[in-house]
Amino acid sequence: MAEPIFDAPIPGGSLTKEIGSRPYKSPPQYNTVEDAIDFYIERMSTEEFSDKLVNSLELGVSVAQIANLMQIHGVMEGQHTLDVSMLILPVLMEFIRYIAETRNTEYNMGIDDYDPNVADDALIVRAVRKLKAAEDEGEEVESINMNEPLSEEQAPLQENMAMGLMARGI
Amino acid sequence: MITNPAGMLYRKMEASLEEPTTDKKPEGFFARGGLQQGSSVEPKEIVSLYFKHFRKAREEFNNG
């Protein structure tokens, strides 16, 4: 049986830190949507940012994921509040899209709801790279026929899986 | 299906492009300095203006 995990945060632990001891516990640097958008647009308009952005998009990272990371980082660094970040999110996504199109880069918007049965593009790209690397090293890779249904042993058990928070295995 | 918050916000914003624009839009909005203090323009409308601005820029780029 697996050992229980004891390194999870203690409930209320975040409230024991001193006020202002973290960037996000201080007043935000940009407290209006206009200031926050100006801050991001200025940073995103640089050649360096565009190059890195194009690389990430070509790796299969979606526009929504990049914009999300940017806004979470902004909140953690105390640049703006969470509500401002939610408001500016569509603008960041549209600007990333604009940069991608001016650089003739193919991109995935990532605006559809998550379907657990569909693999993420970035995951597929990583898997293909791993596979290529293994082939280059001369390892034998077992091929799977995707058209054949999985056998009973291979198929994950779905019917008897317990649901709910307390049903999580330890 | 698990809701994608970023996607939901983006789709909502795209849908709002069909709506008529507000009369409260200040002139020279994109000029440095932006809105005056105490302006009646709501954050949602400001975001919508920026979104439309970049959407227009993208469409103009694609149309040459």
Image (cartoon, grey):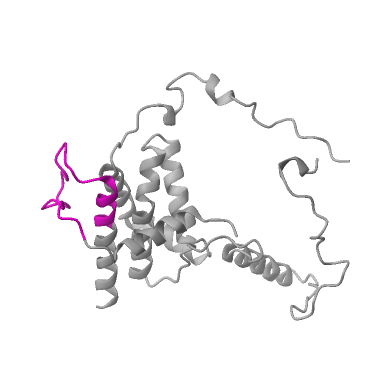
Residue A51 seen in the figure: no
Q: Nearer the viewer, residue A50 or A165?
A: A165
For image coordinates 24% across by 61% down, the residue present is B53
Q: Nearer the viewer, residue A91 or A132?
A: A91
Dominant secondary structure, magenta: loop
For image coordinates 70% across by 31% down, the residue present is A7
Give the image quarter of residue A127.
bottom right
Spot occupied by residue A46 in the image (x, y as percentages of width and height): 31, 54
Q: Specify whether A62 is left or right of B1.
A: left
For image coordinates 30% across by 36% down, the residue present is A31
Spot occupied by residue A128 in the image (x, y as percentages of width and height): 65, 69
Q: Quadrant of the N terminus of chain A?
A: top right
The magenta-colored residue range is B21-50
Give the image quarter of residue B55.
bottom left
Q: Nearer the viewer, residue A143 or B34?
A: B34
Q: Specify whether A65 is left or right of A128.
A: left
Query: Vertically, is A2 above or below A60?
Result: above
